[in-house]
Amino acid sequence: MSASIVQDLLEKTKDFSLEETLRFLAERYPNQVTFSTSFGQEDQVITDFIFKNDIAIKVFTLDTGRLFQETYDVFHRTLKKYKKQIEVYFPEAASVENLLQTKGPNSFYDSVENRKECCFIRKVVPLRKALAGNAVWITGLRAEQSENRHDLSLFEYDGNFEIIKFNPLLKWTLEEVENHLKEFNVPQNALHKEGFISIGCAPCTRAIFPGEDIRAGRWWWESSHKECGLHSAKKE
């Protein structure tokens, strides 16, 4: 069933612009289309399309409790610019308390397993709550962000969260993203100008050096697949 839905969406929207596709989804799945933003460059492009065109798509963010102040700054500027609501989801307090009491505040540096545990508590669990009851999840993923994302499709079924995922910027280049933000004066995270391409939690993100992979700044102390569990889709 999920494969046929994905194919149908791909076929019906193949000649649509990004705005037209967003409107189509909002009309086809009223109150069941949601967009997750972390206020990075790609997400700000999609936020701009949704808010300035007044498309009926819910926008939410995950506050892990360990974000950069610069991320909160762009969050605040986005609210002021568009005057639209962004829902906020937090990790369960008891889970965070237990993690810190049993393993300390920096256990994620000790092993990939510990890091994924922290990501699960602070990101995956709140995301499941945010996606509940929705039919389509919109993301700001781009294929060139990492090798793991090269084989993604514009529409796909995410078996981890049992939802259709729409990746509208999949084929966009970083230059196209930056040009849109500049042209439409969209609020940006100040860290982007300091060499931060992919921005997550403050302890787990650094700027990248010339020639480094675009995801090198995420969990920079380990040699994993550089994913937190949000976008490791199991397709059906």
Image: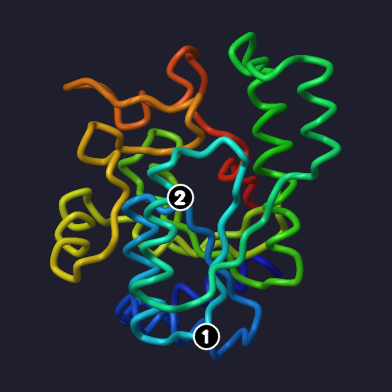
Q: Name the foreground residue: 156 vs 92.
A: 92
Q: Secondary structure at mark 2?
A: helix
Q: Residue at x 66, y 72 (%)?
A: 135
Question: In this figure, what is the number of numbered marks?
Answer: 2
Q: Quadrant of the N terminus?
A: bottom right
Residue 121 percent coordinates (x, y)? 73, 37
Marks 1/2: CA distance? 24 Å
In percent of width and height, residue 3 lies at: 62, 65
In this rendering, position of residue 20 left or right of residue 59:
left
Res. 219 visible in picture: yes
Place of residue 111 in the rendered image (x, y in percent of width and height, measured from the top left): 64, 11
Q: Residues within 10 Å of mark 1 (few under 14, many from 20)?
A: some
Which residue corresponds to mark 2?
72
Q: In the image, is 195 to the left or to the right of 126?
A: left
Helix, strand or loop at label 1? It is loop
Q: Tell me the quarter of the image containing the C terminus.
A: bottom right
Q: Is residue 72 left or right of residue 212?
A: right
Task: State which quadrant residue 196 falls in.
Answer: top left
Numbered disc in front, either 1 or 2: 2
Say whether disc 1 or disc 2 marks the residue closer to the N-terminus: 1
Q: Quadrant of residue 188?
A: bottom left
Considering depth in this image, is 216 or 64 the residue closer to the camera?
Answer: 64
Residue at image x 62%, y 84%?
Answer: 29
Amino acid found under the numbered disc labelled 2: Tyr
Q: Quadrant of residue 214?
A: top left
Residue 54 lies, with reference to residue 57, above or below; the image says below
What is the x, y in percent for residue 67?
51, 39
Q: Examine the rendering and report whether any part of residue 159 can be seen.
A: no
Three-letter amino acid code at the position of disc 1: Ala
Which residue does the image show at 45% across and 38% down from the upper left? 68
**Residue position for label 1:** 56
